Image (spheres, grey):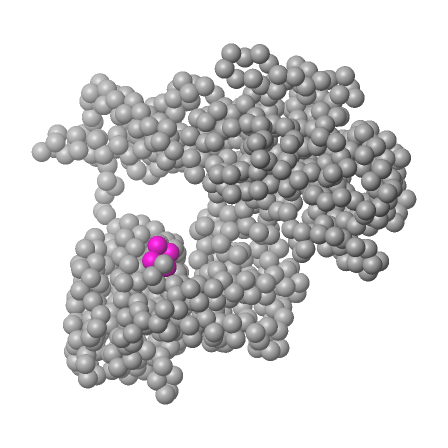
Amino acid sequence: MAKLVVLKFGDGSFEQGFTVTLQIGEESDRPSTEITGKLPPCPEILLYYCRWQSTYLQLGNGYRLDADKIQVTNVSVTQDCHELALIVRARFNTWLQAQEFRPLREKWLEKLQPTDEIRVILQSENSYLQRLPWHIWDLLERYPKAEIALSSPSYELIHKRRTSSPTVNILAIVGNSQGIDTQADQAMLQNCPNADVSFLVEPQRKELTDHLWGKSWDILFFAGHSSSQGDDGIGRIYLNQTDSLSIGELKYALKQAIARGLQLAIFNSCDGLGLAKELADLNIPQIIVMREPVPDQVAQEFLKYFLLSFANGESLYQAVRHARERLQGLEDRFPCATWLPVICQNPAQKPLTWEELTEPPTQPIFNDVPPVSKKRGLKRTVFSSLLVTAAVYGLRFLGALQTGELQAFDQMMRSRPDEGPDPRILIVTIDDEDLAHQRRNNEYLKGTSISEKSLNLLLAKISQYQPKAIGLDIYRDFHAEQPELISRLRQTENLIGICKGSDTSENIKGIESPPEIPQERLGFSDFVHDDDGVVRRHLLFMSQETASLCSASYAFSSQLAFRYLSSLGIQAKFTSGQFTKNLKLGDTVLHRLSSRMGAYQNIDANGGQILLNYRAAKKIAEQVTLTQLLSSPINPNAIKDRIILIGVVAKGDFPDYWATPYGHLLDEQMPGVMVQAHMVSQIISAVLDGRSLLRVWLPGLEIIWIGIWAGLGGFLAWRWRLLPHLALAVGISSSVLYLLCLSLLVWGFWVPFVPSALSLVSTVTLVTIQNSKFLEEEGG
């Protein structure tokens, strides 16, 4: 069920901070959760926004402003606008990550799932707070079905006398169009399904008020010039080349229209927050405006995408988000186009869908129809299933489904049951406090995250407790200066260092290894990431380029696993395959990925790559900070016979963070040392515990699997003709498919989910359409 989230801002200012109340509940129900917090003072956020706004207004992109204020020159400040937008985004999100606001953020994350459809309403009297681009909040961006709207704390429910109608009644006002193209707006409105559109082109004031009084309207639309920049600060619309009106001058006619059922006002014109404020005082249910001057083409594209989504069944909020995000394709010419559209909401009203604005059909679509010949229908169903299977697998082979499959894979990886940490690994982390502590002790870091003094003490303390292997996940491409450290790096036989390989195709030069550590105790640190930057593959070994600064053939994680397993009598070797040599450890074979395998289509599979089966645990292993280990007594059992990983988790001087299936955004990414721990754990757990390595099915088996779900979709459409029953059956089948794919992933098999779901839904749709046409032919 859809969720309703309300953010109430109490008295305050940017100089003093704001009190904030968060309410979360089901749509059309009282809030089930409420929590109060605070946003600290942040006066500079307005300064950054005003700087961006000033640069944006200099672009002069044919805005739908007052015709007297249209700019005719275009100052080349596009890059400045982009850069200032990035600064606003960063400062804005830093403010919303403040400690005082964190309880509200954590409650949001606890109560809301990324799959939820969420209406977010921001209630505040502060006009500057409302003007900020809230859609760039990183928390909102995590939820693909969430959209935010603005609201005043004062509102009232209007008991409407809306009459049932088979069409959506739209009053479209085309005002002064000097310098802009409103013909495109008119054409898009005329193409709306089940809509009765009445156009008023550059009307006189009396003509407009007569229309507002004369008929029950569902949607009020305005295209033309508007502005909130007058001396009085009140929003005005320009009806024609001589007349302009404020909302107050239409107050009585608009009140009548709202009382008779007006649901939505769309002002596809400039700087509409002044118009929205006055309309909100009349308690109109919803308003869509542009928060800043809007270029003509942006206004047209937004209207096109909004009407397409809204008229095809999406909720108003989802239609606005969809249309707003589609504007990103214009931002090379019109910077920050996605910042412009905004919803203003009366919290007492629930938005209606396009279907709810029309009279519901008196009979179900497939009720009381003559039966279709079962034999002929079954043949058609089988043929459709085979056709869809071939089409879906063809799309998959071409790579069209790879992005969706990888996203579904990430979701399933996050949904697996917890395995607990790996008891064979201990991670020594170096965080920002450790860096500060070393500097306070006047220790010289020399371009790395740990001083020679601390590193020497750390290795000495760890070594005395006899770990199986020590992994130094820190670059040291320079000579050590302290004789004792030089000796320790050379003589610690179970110490593994790192270097980074070069890649001329990516213009990556690589990083040299520590000079004191011999080659047989080196591993490369290189990760393989997909096009979206996410690490889903594990590179075990590779051949370095001739000019590479790193000579290591095996990965850092592989070297650590080899050291651990060799102490148990398990040696690494290669299988003697005819075409592919795979790494073998004991009875466990690590089968290499090929360029086409499962969801991956035509990837670079050079080197020894396998799928990375992250350990499903809140933390991969026990952790201790550098300062804690050096300053506190140590339990010998915490180190003895373990693999000790030393790496950086600091976000300041030496950030080493990677996108993983557990998070793509910056604050969700995983430190490199933790990714290395997952890789080490994967190898030794597979060899010693029999933990599953991720595999995919052979192509023939995948085609059969996809075909089974296509056949099920055809059967459902053949068996059930009533849409509610069919929709329920498809929903249950899709849920079963997801649970099956999740269970198989836990057991080590990555099977096609997205292609199977697509084949299921596509076959249902195709067979349903065929049944409808056949019934029409039979009835005709």
Please state the horizontal and vertical placement of residue 424, each as a whole percent of the image. 76, 31
* Res. 705 image quadrant: top left
Query: In the rendered view, does 371 fall on the left or right side of 132?
Result: left
The prevailing secondary structure element of the residues shown in magenta is helix
- The residue range painted magenta reads 327-331
Query: In the rendered view, does 569 fall on the left or right side of 273?
Result: right
Q: Residue at x 62, y 44 (%)?
A: 670
Please state the horizontal and vertical placement of residue 154, each as a whole percent of the image. 46, 75
- The quadrant the C terminus occupies is top left
Q: Nearer the viewer, residue 705 or 43?
A: 43
Q: Nearer the viewer, residue 394 or 141?
A: 394
Toward the bottom, the furthest residue is: 231
Please state the horizontal and vertical placement of residue 221, each as a whole percent of the image. 26, 67
Q: Residue at x 20, y 75 (%)?
A: 178
Instruction: Say whether residue 738 is visible.
Output: yes
Q: Nearer the viewer, residue 171 or 464?
A: 464
Q: Residue at x 28, y 70 (%)?
A: 62
Q: Nearer the viewer, residue 672 or 108?
A: 672
* Res. 495 image quadrant: top right
Toward the front, the furthest residue is: 547
Instruction: Say whether residue 161 is visible.
Output: no
Q: Residue at x 45, y 31 (%)?
A: 603
Q: Is residue 330 magenta?
A: yes
Q: Is residue 67 magenta?
A: no
When the figure is inspected, residue 48 is found, relative to residue 363, above or below; the finding is below
* Res. 338 image quadrant: bottom left
Q: Count of labels shown?
A: 0
Please state the horizontal and vertical placement of residue 434, each as a whole percent of the image. 77, 53
When the figure is inspected, residue 590 is found, relative to residue 78, above or below; the finding is above
When the figure is inspected, residue 227 is found, relative to residue 659, above or below; the finding is below
Toward the left, the furthest residue is: 780
